[in-house]
Amino acid sequence: MTRKIVIEPVTRVEGHGKVTIHLDDSGNVAQARFHVTQLRGFEKFCEGRLFWEMPVITSRICGICPVSHHLASVKAGDALLGVELTPTAKMLRQLIHMAQILQSHSLHFFHLASPDLLFGMDADPAIRNIVGVIAEKPELAIKGVRLRGFGQKIIEMLGDKKVHPNAAIPGGMNRALSREHREEILQQIDGIIADVQIAIDLIKGYCDQNSELAASFASFPSGYLGLIDDNGNLELYDGKLRLKDDKGAILEDKIAPENYLSIIAEMVEDWSYLKFPYYKKMGYPAGIYRVGPLGRLNVADGIATPLANKEFQNFKMLSSNGIVQGSLYFHYARMIEALYSAEMIKSLLQDDLICGKEIWVNSTKLNEEAVGVVEAPRGTLFHHYWIDSSGMIRKVNLIVATGHNNLAMNRAVYDVAKAFIKDGKVSEGILNRVEVAIRCYDPCLSCSTHALGQMPLEIDIYDSDGNIYQRLTS
């Protein structure tokens, strides 16, 4: 007799999703899928809007990473205008972007991921949450709140609001940074860096004490994609695309972001509203790759800031070929990036140019098509716009970071379910492990956009043996 297990909703992630696991006659896993169940439709309803509205509209895609969409969108606007930013404007954008990375990574690590690390995956769900962390580890919870608040404060200084800021405009920025705000941030930054280092020590200690689990949990071969600078270093705001395979071989290198469609294609499945990007040369689904902290550190040769680079070298030593595959290592990579972001904030603010007043350039040029790319906290984010001669949007294509990881998250769910569910025996701790596999990727399901092609609503009705006996289709 077959059996179906449903985890709905998946907890401690941003947005709405579910997992379905089908067991065979022996009670072992035959199939497991991660379904994104919400439909946003931003690609479609942005048609007909003017392109300079897009940085404000698309920032509403998400309340956790609005800056990422804001910047990817405005970079597409820059390219439509054919402009080169002033040095100050670019520094201000990098500053707000680093603040976004720091606050988002801190939110995920301390509030969403740490309960599993601190209390164990089999702990009582009543304490395996942020409330439990506050009760048992209040000093750690305070550090998480402080780090997130620090990042949000910078976003508010530059964009007027902590969430959905209005800071960048095509051609530059709409406000300068005051010297008072600069000094306020600089007075706190050393303490912020120290707090991130404590978090790194925590996740390193966990991985050391649970080395076998960390190396094997949702560990599978895949490609890895991320932006790098001209020296091959980690790059989060600007750069070129690099794709490596699971052995560390470079498959694509220094690809201009606007040429992303030369290496990436997208597939649609009828059981999820999130698209499935894949590496074109390997096809679907063999062209699976991962983005985000693990992907970026796997493709990078180094990190430009000293403290983060030291941790990066330790990270690379986890594997003989420099490619780290275990999904739990996303957390380690995430906090290395948080450290890099904090160091970059300090470096940017130590340059007097950041308080300059030349923050915008005009243009009379208007291109018909443009792509804006940044590394969002969860991975590479593409905004691709086509406009008419009046600047009105004709077509939009968004590939969100969570979308890149869609194949990988489904593989992680299957691998973990198959490894732990045996002979039909399922416990709450086992199901939590399936959720842990998803949380490693820190998916932002609100960023999920409409899928290309027809997406009918289907309702499957199962009999007691787990077989579909009726399917309703809209």
Image (cartoon, rainbow, N blue to C red):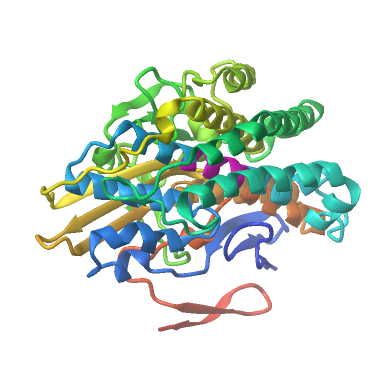
Identify the residue shown where x is 44% and y is 22%: 233
- The residue furthest right is 136
Q: Which residue is pictured at 44% across the width and 47% down the height? A: 404
Q: Position of residue 2 (x, y in %)?
A: 67, 67
Q: Is residue 463 magenta?
A: no
Task: Give me the residue at 56% from left, 28% from top.
Answer: 346
Residue 261 in view here: yes
Relative to 262, does residue 215 appear above or below in the rendering?
above
Please state the horizontal and vertical placement of residue 235, each as a whole percent of the image.
Answer: 43, 30
Identify the image quadrant of the C terminus.
bottom left
Q: Is residue 456 left or right of residue 128?
A: left
Q: Please provide percent x and percent y for residue 355.
A: 43, 35
Q: Main secondary structure of the magenta part?
A: helix
Quadrant of res 264: top left
Query: In the image shown, does 296 or 170 lie closer to the viewer?
Result: 170
Give the magenta range. Answer: 96-105
Q: Is residue 286 visible?
A: no
Number of dots carrying numbers? 0
- Image quadrant in which you'd find residue 193: top right
Left or right: where 314 falls relative to 374: right
Question: Residue drawn at (49%, 20%), measured in percent from left and top?
Answer: 304
Please give left or right for residue 129 compared with residue 306 in the image: right
- Nearer the observer, 162 or 471: 162
In the image, farthest residue toward the front: 180
Residue 392 drawn above or below residue 325: below
Q: Nearer the viewer, residue 21 or 317?
A: 317
Is 213 located above or below residue 429 in the figure?
Answer: above
| Whole-percent x, y for residue 320 in the image | 59, 15
Q: Quadrant of the N terminus?
A: bottom right
